[in-house]
Image: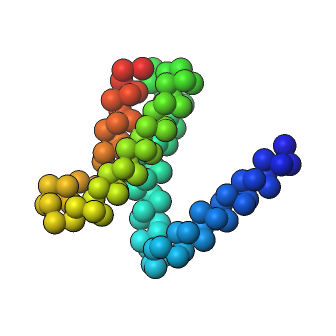
Amino acid sequence: MQEYTIYGLIISGIVAALLALTIPSVIEIWYTIGSICIPGMIIPVISAYYTKLRVSNKIILVEMISAVVFSFIWYIIKENFADVSVINEIEPMLVGMVVSVVIHIIG
């Protein structure tokens, strides 16, 4: 168990250093992390409080991973295709939320 803590701290430190080097503003770091990570957590947390919304643990895991992955992919696409207005106007958080809701409904 203690090994996982050490590995987690090392990985977190590396990710934090990379974020600090690539994104100059603290506000932009918070925006980026929030846009990518929050969609994977909102629906699972809400479903934990309401029994009618609960789904299996496997579905929740797929939902969380998929929402974060799609948000991250959209963030990368948005950064690389800034001149396309349709892509630039859709936030990564919205893409992740749509993926999360769709998977939750299917599950």
Q: From this viewpoint, which residue is outermost toward the left?
A: 85
Whether 47 is drawn above or below 92: the answer is above
Report whether residue 96 is seen.
Answer: yes
Does the image show residue 51? no
- Relative image position of residue 22 (x, y in whole percent): 47, 73
| Residue 34 figure quarter | bottom left
Q: Which residue is rendered at x = 34% and y = 56% of the image?
A: 75
Name the residue at 42% across, 20% down. Answer: 107
Image height of 21 relative to 51, above or below:
below
Above or below residue 98? Residue 103 is above
> Of residues 78 and 35, which is closer to you in this image?
78
Task: Spot the residue most to the bottom.
Answer: 24
Task: Give the residue at x 27% y 59%.
Answer: 78
So how many labels did they put on this image?
A: 0
* Residue 80, percent from left and from top: 28, 62
Quarter the N terminus occupies: top right
- Tell me if 10 is positioned left or right of 31 in this view: right
In this rendering, position of residue 10 left or right of residue 62: right
Q: Hey, which quadrant is residue 27 in on the image?
A: bottom left
Which residue occupies 47% across, 69% down?
A: 29
| Residue 25 image offset from top left, x and y in percent | 45, 78
Q: Nearer the viewer, residue 84 or 63?
A: 84
43, 18: nearer the viewer = 18
Q: Is residue 7 above or below residue 101?
A: below
- Residue lying at the far front of the rendered structure: 80
Residue 91, given in percent of the width and then of the height, sits at 28, 55
